[in-house]
Image (cartoon, helix red, strand yellow):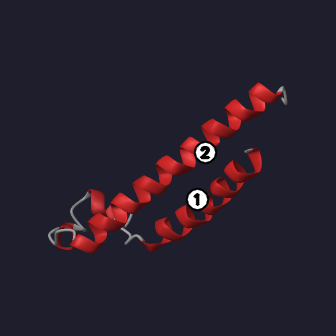
Amino acid sequence: MIIATSIVLILASLLMVVLVLMHKGKGGGLSDMFGGGISSSLGGSSVVERNLDRLTIGVGVVWFASIAVLALLFKHKGVG
């Protein structure tokens, strides 16, 4: 059970990195705070971006859950 959960955690971690890198950058630094990014923020998010957000959140939940399950398994086993 520990090995299977560890594999899920590794896969979720790798997928999380890929998904986060696929996101479009939204900030441009200090110039956005003073109105420099107004034209770029006028375009709404597309369906693809919303689905990417949902997928990223879903993978994040799986990632967090696998960490919690591993912690419980190790605590039950007496390791740590």
Residue hosting label 1:
12
Indicate the quadrant where residue 41 lies. Answer: bottom left
Residue hosting label 2:
66
Asked whether, in this view, residue 34 is left or right of residue 59, the answer is: left
Whether the residues at callouts 2 and 1 have beta carbons within 8 Å, the answer is yes
**Image height check: is 12 above or below 43?**
above
How many marks are shown on the rendered structure? 2
Q: Measure the C-alpha gap from mark 2 to mark 1.
A: 9 Å
**Which of the two residues, 79 or 29, is positioned nearer the viewer here?**
79
Could you tell me residue 34's position as x and y percent?
A: 25, 59
Asked whether, in this view, residue 71 is left or right of residue 37, the answer is: right
Asked whether, in this view, residue 80 is left or right of residue 60, the answer is: right
In this orientation, does residue 27 appear? no
What is the secondary structure assignment of the residue under circle 1? Answer: helix
Q: Residue at x 75, y 45 (%)?
A: 2
Query: Residue lying farthest right?
Result: 79
